[in-house]
Amino acid sequence: MFKKKTFLVLTLLVFASCNFNSPTNFTEKTLEDSFYDLNNKSIELKQILQQNKGQKILFNIWASWCKDCIVGMPDLIAFQKKHPTVKYVFLSIDRSMFRWKTAVEKYRIKGQHFFMKNGLNSAFGDFLNSNWIPRYLVVNENGTIDLFKAKKITDKRIVEALKK
C-alpha cells in the first residue's frame, strides 16, 4: 500500500511540475523562420507579422493532402464571411509548391498564403510542437498569441480570442 501511495504522490509531482501553458510570444528562432509566398519570394515570420501589425491574425496551418483541412474549408469560408476584418494567414506544409498553389486556387482560399519549405521540420514546426493539422493560432494586434492551439475553425475559443 505504501508503494502505491508513494508512486501516486511522485506521479502527481511530475505532472504538477510540467508546463502545460501555451506560449504567448514567438521565439526569435521562430520569427526568423522563412516561408515562400505565392510569387516564390522568401519571407520571414517576423515580416509576415509586421505586415499585419495592428490587426487580429488567424493563422491556419494546413496542406492540400489533409482530409480534415479540406473538409473544414466550407466552415472556414463561412467563418471568414462572419469575421471580415480578421487577417487570414495560411501556412501550408504541402510537399509540393505546385500542389499547394493548385489547392489555393481550387478551393478559392482568401487570405495571405505561404509555403513552409520544410513543413513541420522547421523552427516554426518545432514551436508548434504538434504533428496535427489543421491547426489554428490567433495573434492579436500587438503580435501576442492569444490562442495557441485549435484544431477546428468551429472551436469556440477562436471567436473568444478574436474578441479580446
Image (cartoon, helix red, strand yellow):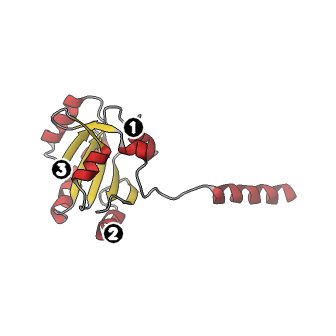
Examine the rendered structure and indicate whether residue 47 appears above or below residue 19.
above
Q: Quarter holding the N terminus? A: bottom right
Q: Secondary structure at mark 1?
A: loop
Callout 3 amino acid? Gly
Whether pointer 1 and pointer 2 mark residues with C-beta atoms closer than 8 Å, the reply is no
Q: Nearer the viewer, residue 147 or 153?
A: 147
| Residue drawn at the location 76% of the way across and 60% of the way down | 9
- Determine which residue is flagged by label 2: 160
Between 159 and 143, the one lying in front of the other is 143
Question: Badge 1, how many Cα within 10 Å: few under 14, some, many 20+?
Answer: many
Kindly report the distance in space between the C-alpha atoms of the residues bearing marks 1 and 3: 21 Å
Residue 112, position as x, y percentages in the image:
19, 47
SS for tag 2?
helix
Any part of residue 164 in sight: yes
For label 2, the crowd category at 10 Å Cα-Cα, with few meaning under 14, some 14 to 19 and many 20 or more, is few
| The C terminus: image quadrant | bottom left
Identified by mark 1, the residue type is: Leu
- Residue at x 20% of width, y 53% of height: 74
Residue 161: image x %, image y %? Answer: 34, 66
Q: Are marks 2 and 3 in contact (CB under 8 Å)?
A: no
> Label 3: few (<14), some or many (≥20) within 10 Å?
some
